[in-house]
Image: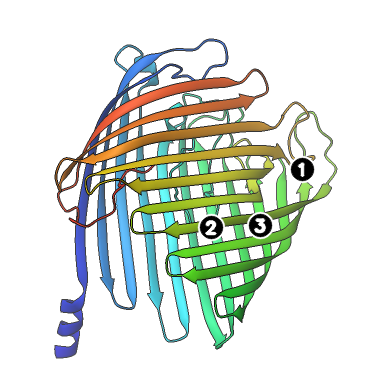
Amino acid sequence: MALRTLSALATDYQINPRLELAGGYDDNVNLGATNEIAAGYALADARLELLAQEPNWRWRATPEVRGNWYPDHSDFDSNGEFLYLDGERNGPRYTLDLYGYGASQSLIANYLPTANIASGLGVSQPGTTLATPASIRQNLGYLRPSYALDMTPRSSLELNLNYTVATYSQEVQGYTNYHNVAGAIGLALKATPTGSVTLRATGANFQPDVGRDTDTYGANVQWDGRLSATHQYYLRVGAARTDLSGSIAGAAAASTSTTTATGGAGAQWTFTLTEIFVDLTRDPEPTGQGYVVNRNQLRLRVSRRFTPRLAGFLGARAIHDEPVSGSAAPTVLAQRYNYGTVGFEWRMGREFSVIGAYDFTDYHQYGPAAQANAARVSLVYEPHRAENGPAITVGY
């Protein structure tokens, strides 16, 4: 009983709230290519980080609610509810990770991808939607457990599994409900004191309510380098084969197969005053439009602390989706999406900060490209923010 009490007392519990209130202006709220609508807006975002940890395990849950209001165009008002989960447990020879999130959000321009880094190097964020924003609601769930076992001092076994399910309030604008199951098994070999090579086999099954079922399987080889605790990078090359079954409008019902190259390269540096994250990936990904794409994606994030109270940031995200041959109707073409942001965060005190940002969006689907420019100013309240915490707290 005494040991259990001491163990319970050693657990570190934290409750960290964050509230953001913002105002801004967007010169193309509907992200239209010809009929642009400009409007001012207000934003509120509230989240609560619940953290429990001990030396060999950690669990975090973060619920979040977000709302956008357009005084002169109420038809663009929207809201989103989110829940993020992640945990880790370490044993003498193993590491068990669990990551997941749930989201219920309106599919308008405010919820298109940003430069926020929601997953680590080489891991794309599932459920990303690029189709023309529509007044429908998406409910998305994602769960990704992973397990690593040290078999010898120089080799380890890696197991990964993830499940995605998405439903929509209406099956319009090409959206359809779907679920996707994917997994990977890999053998990691330590080749040098700072580097390791992993041989990995992958597989996935995508089943949309409307569209072709898709089985994807492949293999890749990845080099991971960790030059220090603050500098890591990776290189990955591979190939994936997709097998399609079922029929869609405008295409034959016969099964088809195709093989494409996959890969990735990225690095992350974390210094005392500067943080740099850059990642380039190419992988088959399911979409809410009922077909599979080869997604080429670039994620970039740079933040810099100029003074103890002032920091700046810039970020970018570029996505180029190419439908896998035979997975979509002949009229469905590639989509291109580019997003950039630059701004600052000024800490007025430990609990309050002001954030200013400019965002640029470029979106090309089927017809002429659509572009939008937006600017916003936010006031952030974090009562439990550490005095020596990170310079940038905003997700961008």
Towards the viewer: 265 or 287:
265
Secondary element type, mark 1: loop
Q: Is residue 23 left or right of residue 146?
A: left
Towards the viewer: 78 or 311:
311
Identified by mark 2, the residue type is Ala
Q: CA gap, disc 1 to disc 2?
A: 40 Å
Q: Give x and y (percent) for residue 119.
A: 47, 54
Which of the two discs, 3 and 1, sits closer to the camera?
Answer: 3
Please give the name of the residue rendered at 59% of the width and 36% of the height, measured from the top-left corner.
176
Which sits earlier in the primary sequence, circle 1 or circle 2? 1
Q: In which quarter of the view is residue 152 placed? A: bottom right
Which of the two discs, 1 and 2, sits closer to the camera?
Answer: 2
Q: Give x and y (percent) for residue 245.
A: 77, 46
Which sits earlier in the primary sequence, circle 3 or circle 1? 3
Q: Residue under circle 1?
A: 246
Please give the name of the residue rendered at 48% of the width and 32% of the height, measured from the top-left corner.
169
Q: Residue under circle 2?
A: 267
Identified by mark 3, the residue type is Ala
Q: CA gap, disc 3 to disc 1?
A: 17 Å
Q: Give x and y (percent) for residue 313.
A: 38, 41
Q: Is residue 267 left or right of residue 342?
A: right
Where, quadrant-wise, is the N terminus in this rendering?
A: bottom left
Which of the two discs, 2 and 3, sits closer to the camera?
Answer: 2
186 relative to 348, above or below: below
Q: Is residue 180 left or right of residue 144?
A: right
Secondary element type, mark 2: strand
Q: Which mark is residue 204?
A: 3
Where, quadrant-wise, is the C terminus in this rendering?
A: top left
